């Protein structure tokens, strides 16, 4: 009961307050605007071209980061699933990026990787006669996606590695006895076994990456080569509240995003339940 009450206080109460403000027209710059307006804020948000642009950026950013991190994570999981000297140290080093907070990661890439004078990327391209590229502004969206891939590849790797370590050794040995090579074994046995784990990683990754804010705030401030090129849902809400002082529009956008995220979470929980049932059945 104490844990349940704590979760209600820190999650449901703030959401109810947000829902309350979404039905009002509160702009702190407009005196007397804090009054009930019904669904007016929702219609304003849904008809806002910047919100639709944020939706496209969110989908593009999330899909790119999730797919790339899953491909890299699966590759790394297959490699470190093999026994070799120093495997524990390598596995710990690969997990480290996932443990760094987003703001610190953004600062690391902003100064060390993307820096125009002392960045590693500028040092590499200088070999080809190119110098002082403003990566975070010229290639804003790819720069943010690269940071997200660096952060979330360890997460995908751990999920796939768990699937690999739960694979039946008898099935692998039987495939070897039947003359199957490594590629045939992976396609026919390993990949079907990993399918649920991969789907789970994609869904959970999507739920978390869609909330990306710290990396965008540090690297691009929501801008980019085409104006608002990296403004996703989270940063759109921030701009409505912090820059425009329109708390009702920010609350309405937040409610819309929460509903969309809950739909994705429902699919993730359903898949997770099926995974547990399949594990118990074996």
Image: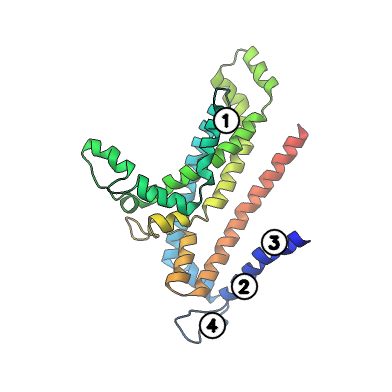
CA gap, disc 4 and disc 2:
14 Å
Q: Residue under label 2, please give it.
A: 17
Decide which of 218, 179 is in the foreground and name it. 218
Q: Residue under label 1, please give it.
A: 88
Q: Nearer the viewer, mark 3 or mark 4?
A: 3
How far across and down, in percent of the image, does residue 46 sit?
Answer: 49, 67
Decide which of 191, 94 is in the foreground and name it. 94
Task: Let me know if residue 60 appears in the view.
Answer: no
Q: Which mark is residue 7?
A: 3
Q: Which of the 4 image quadrants contains residue 13?
A: bottom right
CA gap, disc 2 and disc 3:
15 Å
Rendered position, 24 above or below 277 = below
Task: Let me know if residue 216 appears in the view.
Answer: yes
Q: Nearer the viewer, mark 2 or mark 3?
A: 3
How far across and down, in percent of the image, does residue 120 sit?
Answer: 33, 41
Is the residue marked by circle 1 packed among few (<14), some (14-19), or many (20+) residues within 10 Å? few
CA gap, disc 1 and disc 3:
36 Å
CA gap, disc 2 and disc 1:
46 Å
How far across and down, in percent of the image, does residue 133 sit?
Answer: 27, 48
Q: Residue under label 4, please give it.
A: 34
Marks 4 and 2, the one that precedes in the sequence: 2
**Cβ atoms at labels 4 and 1 below 8 Å apart:** no
Farthest residue, direction right: 1
Is the residue marked by circle 4 packed among few (<14), some (14-19), or many (20+) residues within 10 Å? some
Q: Is residue 125 left or right of residue 250?
A: left
Which residue occupies 60% across, 52% down? 264
Q: Which of the 4 image quadrants contains residue 2?
A: bottom right
CA gap, disc 4 and disc 1:
57 Å
Which of the image's four quarters has the N terminus? bottom right
Is the residue marked by circle 2 packed among few (<14), some (14-19), or many (20+) residues within 10 Å? few
């Amino acid at each position: 009961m104490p844990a349940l009450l704590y979760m209600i206080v820190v999650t449901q109460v703030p959401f109810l307050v947000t829902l309350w403000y979404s039905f009002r027209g509160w702009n702190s710059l407009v005196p007397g605007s804090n009054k009930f307006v019904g669904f007016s804020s929702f219609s304003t948000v849904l008809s806002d071209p910047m919100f639709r642009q944020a939706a496209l950026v969110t989908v593009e950013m999330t899909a790119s980061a999730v797919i790339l991190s899953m491909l890299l994570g699966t590759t790394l999981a297959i490699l470190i699933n093999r026994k070799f000297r120093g495997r524990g140290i390598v596995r710990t080093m690969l997990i480290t990026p996932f443990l760094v907070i987003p703001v610190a990661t953004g600062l690391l890439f902003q100064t060390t990787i993307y820096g125009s004078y002392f960045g590693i990327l500028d040092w590499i391209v200088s070999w080809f006669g190119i110098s002082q590229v403003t990566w975070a502004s010229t290639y804003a969206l790819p720069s943010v996606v690269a940071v997200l891939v660096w952060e979330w590849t360890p997460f995908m790797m751990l999920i796939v590695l768990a699937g690999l370590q739960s694979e039946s050794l008898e099935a692998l040995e039987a495939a070897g006895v039947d003359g199957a090579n490594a590629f045939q074994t992976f396609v026919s046995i390993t990949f079907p076994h990993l399918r649920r784990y991969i789907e789970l990683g994609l869904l959970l990754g999507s739920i978390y990456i869609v909330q990306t804010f710290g990396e965008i705030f540090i690297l691009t401030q929501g801008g980019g080569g085409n104006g608002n090129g990296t403004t996703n849902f989270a940063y759109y809400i921030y701009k409505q509240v912090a820059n425009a002082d329109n708390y009702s529009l920010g609350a309405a956008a937040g409610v819309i995003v929460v509903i969309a995220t809950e739909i994705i979470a429902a699919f993730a929980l359903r898949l997770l339940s099926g995974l547990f049932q399949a594990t118990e059945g074996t």
